[in-house]
Amino acid sequence: MNQEYALKECHATPYAIAAFSMIDKAVRWGGRMHPQDHLHEYVYEQGDTGAGDFLHFMNWLREVAPELTPNVYPVFKPKKLSPLQAADFVTWEQRFFACEHLRGRIPEVRESFAILMKLEKDWGVIDRPKLIEWCDWMEIPKRGASAPLSQRERARWRPAPLSKIKRLSAPRGRGAGH
């Protein structure tokens, strides 16, 4: 995808996209399931590659829509926290199965993953069609015959203006929630 869109130059790295999507899901879930409660911490693991790109998006969101996100900002904590270890485990299991499936192989479902599959979930795999939709929504420049973005253009680039964004999240389309 980075060959079609200027993802890297616009801080739209895999970590940034996934982390931004997870905050969106948490905010939406909280609004549906616990509208009176306010989640105050969105915890991510310290030291992950791509965290700076994720913060780029979160800082932009705070800049353009502070009223939408007064309590929505990531907190980075050490990996030794048990919930982060559990999240790593679930993510590894899901990623392993998804990658094998995409390669045309159906791996034997490990007992631990079978248990996870029984739980209510919305893992939200971001596949190619969903990523293209997201890039278009955020107005990430397409690559083409033109020259790559200059350093100045990269520094000035921001996601689509808030006036074009009708809701906090990217549109729900093909590819969400697989």
Image (cartoon, grey):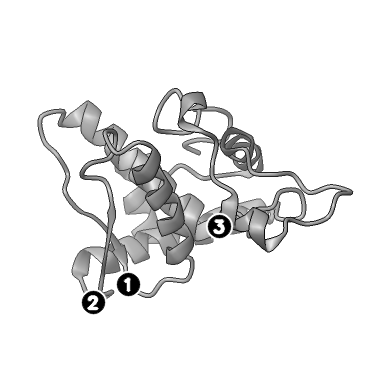
- Which residue does the numbered mark 2 point to in the structure image? 80
In this picture, residue 33 sits left or right of residue 14: left
Nearer to us in this view, 78 or 153:
153
Q: The residue tagged with tag 1: helix, strand or loop?
A: loop
- Which residue does the numbered mark 1 point to in the structure image? 46
In this picture, residue 124 sits left or right of residue 103: left
Crowdedness of circle 1 by 10 Å Cα count: few (<14), some, many (20+)?
few
What amino acid is found at the position of numbered circle 2 in the picture?
Lys
Residue 2 x %, y %: 70, 55
Report the Cα–Cα distance between label 1 and label 2.
10 Å
Query: Is the Cβ of the residue at disc 1 closer than 8 Å to that at disc 2?
Result: no
In this picture, residue 142 sits left or right of residue 155: right
Nearer to us in this view, 66 or 135:
66
Q: The residue tagged with tag 3: helix, strand or loop?
A: loop
Query: Which of pointers 1 and 2 lies earlier in the amino acid sequence?
Result: 1
- Nearest to viewer (mark 3 / mark 1): 3
Residue 101 disc label: none
- Which residue does the numbered mark 3 point to in the structure image? 11
What amino acid is found at the position of numbered circle 3 in the picture?
His
